[in-house]
């Protein structure tokens, strides 16, 4: 007698899960499998159809100097944006977590760059970086200093994009740290003051360890963000000059939609997914022992 209600309960549960499962398979699992399979085939055309080449695309990628340059650019980009964005987010969260005059306005000012569309942000910073007429060169000219083509110089184009990305992302990460700080018991700070601990000692020994779960979450998001930049490059540099600002996802976009070499783009995508998976697993295994869950 109890089998029928149990069966109906299971059927009802699976019916509730079915819409989400269909979307997950259609837009996550199937594209991933199709991309991996596509990386083992050659570029097809109306005259010469696609054929199975095995690891041929991976061998071509390993011999591609642009791929290695783009990968190095992306690693430098990640190294420049991730730690600075997280450090600024913590500093801003600590600043607006205190009783300040106009605290709500300060929080909104810190968070505003996050809600701006990426294309709008790129156009704003394009005005900043424009040679001679841009805001930065105008400020330098006021002090008698020469202007510079920030986006046209291979030595400055990647740092310029790093600065813009930090400005865009730090406020977003601040929100998570602010939420975490508001759950820290104030008695801990009072006890630290009674014991004569300095602010730096309290932050390093008490507060920051309590923020480690948030730091792990923010770190994973920061790594993902550092490998998915396309919009800014499309507006600002298109990967130039001489691929000095080209990043891995933009190179995938170029290969697929500019050169119409979808198998090679699939190969690059597989490498990108593998790289992100390794980084995510490394973060979990290396940081999990240092995290204090409550």
Image (cartoon, helix red, strand yellow):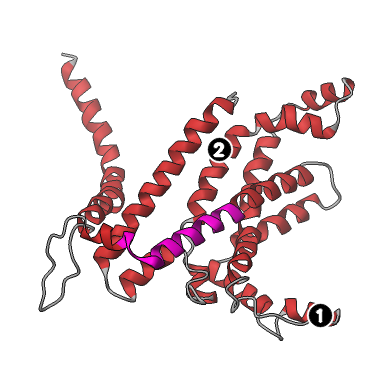
Nearest the camera: 101 or 270?
Answer: 270
Q: Residue at x 79, y 23 (%)?
A: 187
Q: Residue 215: percent from the left, percent from the top? A: 60, 39
Classify residue 248 by image quadrant. bottom left
Packing grade of label 2 (10 A; few <14, some 14-19, many >=20) is: some
Nearest the camera: 23 or 181?
Answer: 181
Secondary structure, mark 2, is helix
Packing grade of label 1 (10 A; few <14, some 14-19, many >=20) is: few
Q: Distance of mark 1 from mark 2, alpha carbons? A: 42 Å
Nearest the camera: 178 or 129?
Answer: 129
Residue placed under numbered mark 1 in the picture: 145
Q: Is residue 111 above or below residue 219?
A: below
Q: Residue 218: percent from the left, percent from the top? A: 57, 43
Q: Residue 45: percent from the left, percent from the top? A: 15, 75
Residue placed under numbered mark 2 in the picture: 216
Q: Residue 239: percent from the left, percent from the top? A: 48, 72
Classify residue 188 by image quadrant. top right
Q: Which residues are magenta?
A: 61-81
């Amino acid at each position: 007698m109890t089998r029928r209600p149990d069966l109906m309960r299971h059927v009802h549960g699976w019916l509730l899960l079915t819409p989400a499962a269909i979307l997950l398979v259609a837009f996550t699992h199937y594209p991933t499998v199709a991309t991996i399979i596509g990386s083992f085939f050659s570029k097809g055309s109306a005259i010469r159809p696609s054929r199975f080449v095995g690891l041929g695309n991976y061998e071509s990628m390993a011999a591609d100097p642009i791929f290695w340059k783009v990968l190095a650019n992306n690693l430098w980009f990640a190294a420049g944006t991730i730690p600075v964005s997280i450090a600024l987010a913590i500093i801003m969260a600590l600043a607006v977590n205190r009783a300040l005059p106009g605290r709500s306005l300060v929080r909104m000012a810190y968070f505003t760059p996050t809600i701006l569309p990426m294309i709008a942000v790129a156009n704003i910073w394009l005005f900043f970086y424009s040679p001679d007429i841009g805001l930065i060169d105008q400020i330098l000219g006021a002090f008698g200093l020469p202007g510079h083509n920030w986006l046209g110089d291979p030595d400055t184009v990647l740092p310029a994009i790093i600065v813009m990305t930090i400005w865009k992302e730090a406020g977003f990460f601040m929100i998570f740290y602010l939420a975490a700080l508001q759950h820290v018991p104030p008695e801990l700070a009072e006890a630290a003051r009674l014991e004569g601990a300095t602010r730096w000692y309290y932050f390093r020994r008490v507060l920051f360890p309590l923020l480690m779960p948030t730091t792990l979450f923010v770190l994973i998001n920061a790594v993902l963000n550092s490998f998915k930049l396309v919009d800014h490059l499309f507006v600002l540099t298109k990967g130039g000059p001489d691929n000095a600002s080209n990043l891995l996802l933009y190179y995938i976009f170029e290969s697929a939609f500019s050169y119409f070499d979808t198998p090679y783009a699939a190969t690059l995508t597989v490498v990108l997914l593998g790289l992100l998976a390794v980084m995510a697993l490394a973060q979990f295994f290396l940081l999990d022992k240092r995290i204090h869950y409550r």
